[in-house]
Amino acid sequence: MDMTQVITIIAGIIISVLSYFTKATMDRLSKVEDTASATKIKLEILQNDHTNKNENLQEKIEALTAIVKELSIDIKELNKRLKD
């Protein structure tokens, strides 16, 4: 074997090793991208759910506040009737 063949073999081995690690890295990157996409979708679902629950709670609190005010007025009227 002459020097050119040895250099070619060494270069081929180096390229093979680099290719192996590059492919492994790209495979891991692909898995990370898939996980990130799934996580993003789940996060959006949770955000929408939280927003909907928060809006419903606000509506219920407002309704309860109105009912308490009405009950307070009714109680005052009943107290006036009892005093008379």
Image (cartoon, grey):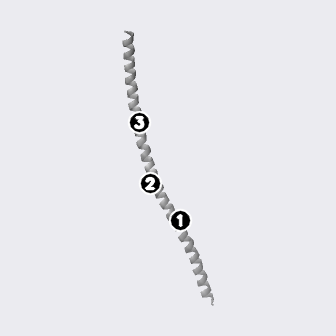
Between residue 72 and residue 39, name the one nearer to us: 72
Give the quadrant of residue 66.
top left
The residue labelled by disc 1 is 28
As measured in the structure, the alpha-carbon distance from the residue carrying label 1 to the one carrying label 3 is 44 Å
Residue 8 sits above or below residue 83 on the image? below
Q: Which residue is found at the position 48% from the left and 55% from the top?
A: 39
Q: Is residue 30 left or right of residue 8?
A: left
| Disc with the residue nearer the chain's start (2 vs 3) | 2
Instruction: Give the residue at x 63% y 90%.
Output: 2
Amino acid at circle 2: Ile
Furthest residue in direction top, as rendered: 84
Asked which secondary structure carries label 1, the reply is helix
Q: Residue at x 49, y 64 (%)?
A: 30
Q: Amino acid at mark 3?
A: Gln
Distance between the alpha carbons at the discs numbered 2 and 3: 26 Å
In depth, the one of 55 and 19 nearer the eye is 55
Give the side of residue 70 with respect to residue 12, left or right. Answer: left
Q: Circle 3 sits on which residue? A: 58
If you read the primary sequence from the N terminus, does the residue marked by circle 2 or circle 1 appear first? 1
75 w.r.t. 52: above or below:
above
Task: Please tell me in which quadrant of the rendered image residue 16 appears.
Answer: bottom right
Q: Amino acid at mark 1?
A: Arg
Does 84 appear above or below 12? Answer: above
Residue 81 quadrant: top left
Q: Which mark is residue 41?
A: 2
